[in-house]
Amino acid sequence: MAFAIAFLYVVWLSVLNSSASKECSSARCKCIDLGDGTWAANCTRRNIKQIPLFAKNISKINLSHNLISGIGTDTEWPQMLKELYMRENQIKSIASSAFRALVHLEVLNLAGNKLWYIYSPELSYLQSLTNLRILDLSNNVDYRRDTSYPVHGFRFLRKLESLKIDGLRRGNFKDGDWNLTTLTNLTVSGITGKCYFEKLQGGFFGGLPSLILLEITGCPIKTIHKDVFSPLHSLHTLDLSHNQLLTFAVLTNLSFDLQFTNIRVLKVKKLYCRHGLGTYLSNNQVVHFKNTSITDLDLSGNHIEMMHPEVPKYFPPNMTRLNIAENRFTWGMYMLAYQFLTKLKVIDISKQFSNHFQNIPSFYCQNSIDCASTDSEMHAPLNTLDWNASTMVKSTSPQSDLDLSKKQVTFYVPKSLEKLFFHDSNFAFTIPEVHLGNNFCRQYHVQNNFFSTLNGPMYGMGYTEYVDISGNLVHYISPQFFNSFPNMTYLNLSNNILGNILNDTVKEDHFKALQKLKEIKLSNNTISSIPPKLLSGAVSLETLDLSNNLITNFTCTLSENTPLKHLDLSANRLNVISSQTIHRLESFHERKNLTINPSGNFFDCTCETIFFLQWVRDSKIHFLEKNKYTCRNSHLRRRTFSELNDIIRELEQNCTSNLPRTIGITVSVMVVLTIGIMGTLYKFRWTIRYFFYRTKLEIQEIVKPSTRKMNREYRYSAFVLYSENDSIFVENDLVHQLELQEGLQLCLSNRDFSPGLRKFANVTHAIHNSRKIICVVTTDFLDDRWCIHQLQMALEDKVHREDEEDCIICILFRDPSLGDLGGSQQSLLIMPLIQNRSHALYSQNPEGHAPFWRRLIAALRE
């Protein structure tokens, strides 16, 4: 009978092997040819209850997320074969026979089944897999069971390198029967599987001497004793993340053990209680880290609020990457001690004060602080420390205290730092003038904060290449802020509010110093118009992103030699691109193959924009998704550019037939009207002139009779208009002759203007309350816009005066000529006054001064 069973089994395997090109298992799994003569069978999520039969040339099997218990028969096996096996009771599980012939199997995934759900599992079928290298048995534990590992099921896996398994309550890896001397990777996780370890004692991993990567995450571990990890001399990566019951108390024993390993990567993220108190990191918790070989340290997500100022000094000396994201750091002296980390290349301080809940097991826990050991550290005076704050910062102020608000401070950063991550931290402050020493950092990721104002300048940014300030609600950037970033190649300013400082009224280029800039993103900034000098100095620019703004008229301001490759104008409000800009874009395309994205705009397809439509059709520039662009005709009907040829053909016909006739009619009507009006005026010119002067004379007789003169009282004899550069003549000579000698009252802006009124109100009041207006006309007067404006106000007042005709008197210092009167506006104002003889010439000869003053005084007393 046994011979018959064996014969039937061999026949069944032969059938499978002969049909391997179509089927590689009895469960009709998805079979993949790996190209090396072996196959991979993907049997995941097929509700399989027993391990099926496989062809012998299978090297990878994925049976995850099924209902396999490890005992019983495959329902697809022949009924006779099942009965023969059960009757003879040759083996406990047909699964052992299913795997026995798989001499090529290297990868086996049984995760997410029911291997531990009823009783201690029977895993003897694994003994035949002598070439197995990767085994996944995670997420198979029945949480109601209190079991240990069936060590005999693993002892023959002499080539096993990677094992994923659940953490059993009575399970450990100290038993010598494991004999997994080749195992390098071990994962016990309550996140991807089940884990019920409550403590790790010395020798816990004694049966796994070659471990390189060890991951124990999401477990209810409360205690880790000493000497748990110290025997693992080859340990390279240790991940203890998401063990919420450990808290930072574990760091003392952990740092002690890791001194004796080859550890390079340590991850201890989220060891805190989800709703616990803030964490304080003390010296005794990290003091042994300085003796380790750690290069990558992850302390993220631990609610750290403060640390002792000396803690950074005890960090691993060879550390190149530090992750302290998702904490709650507050300002403290420890922030100045990072220069001890001389080999640090990457630091991540992002996502401060943020809550990122993950689908991980949650345990009842409570953060605690050993007040007896930490209170003295938290309140230690600075003079007790064996480091000096003056080595971290240098100040130009002689004061002894470190008051950053009153002194210019130079912050020294780790000299090897290359990347800084400080994004999504909800920090809100203005970036003032900053001095950074020994700064060789190349990348700054500071997006999604609230750095609304960038004043700067930031000194010491000469090595910066990459800056991301997107999503910071930036509304102001000083023109000098980027002057200290000469080597920057990438700048992201998207998702800010730069529309007010980047518009066509701004004359300065905020990015003039960025000559090596290759890519800039200015999307989502409410930009409505382009500054005339925007990026005119960015001679290396290759990518310009102006998408999702409010631009209605795009003007290319880039230098002609700019190697532009990508231009994104999508989602703006463009209805056309001007012919001048088109010419500039074509010149860019001649040097580099240009790609443009103008999608999502409101283009017009009318006679006025036909040149733009023809350009889009004929240009060799690559337009992204050209057929999806839309335009509106004169009847506001939308059409897509998929029918661009038809649109242009229709416009050419309509515009060609109507344009000459429309222009001819318009010009003819304008010529006829112009000739008619000019002829009428010429024919009746003398009649019109006569009635004009007659009407003027009659109005003067009614409003201002010549037989009498309206009397009016004024506060000042004269209001003096003069430039500040002529104040010596006014305040010395003019005041002496007119006020002190003649008793006249002058109104001077520097002396008599009321400080409680605005300039315009003071000038209006002075003019209205002065009998005469004296203008000291010099070259400075003509160049002073404020003086000209005051003169215009005086002339306006003169028109409405009823008792004076020549109330404005000009004092000149030489005979006037048209060339001395400045621009056309000054000529139109001053020349009529001079021609009407309302001026007095101040002689350069002292003998002529007396007649000048007599004439001026007489004019003021009229």
Image (cartoon, helix red, strand yellow):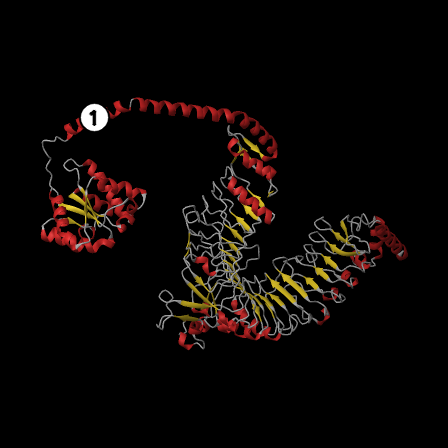
Image location of residue 673, percent across then percent down: 38, 23
Residue 509 lies, in percent from the top left, at 45, 52
Q: Tag count in the figure?
A: 1
Task: State the residue in front, 261 or 27.
Answer: 261
- Element carrying mark 1: helix
Whether residue 296 is situated above or below residue 768 in the rendered picture: below
User: Residue flagged by tag 1: what amino acid is it?
Assistant: Thr
The N terminus lies in quadrant: bottom right
Q: Nearer the viewer, residue 216 or 123?
A: 216
In the rendered image, which quarter is residue 715 located in? top left
Q: In this image, 744 relative to 468: left or right?
A: left
* Picture quadrant of residue 399: bottom left
Crowdedness of circle 1 by 10 Å Cα count: few (<14), some, many (20+)? Answer: few
Q: Can the viewer see residue 167?
A: no
Q: Is residue 448 left or right of residue 819?
A: right
In this view, the residue in front, 622 or 436, is: 622
Position of residue 9 relative to residue 284, above or below, is above
Quadrant of the frame with the C terminus: top left
Residue at image coords 60%, 30%: 646
Q: Residue at x 40, y 76 (%)?
A: 383
Q: Is residue 82 visible?
A: yes
Question: Which residue is at a point 41% across and 71% down the rendered structure image?
Answer: 394
In the rendering, at what x and y percent does residue 190 appear? 61, 59
Q: Please name the residue that numbered disc 1 is placed on.
A: 695
Residue 731 horizontal/vertical position (percent): 18, 54
Q: Is residue 167 left or right of residue 576?
A: right
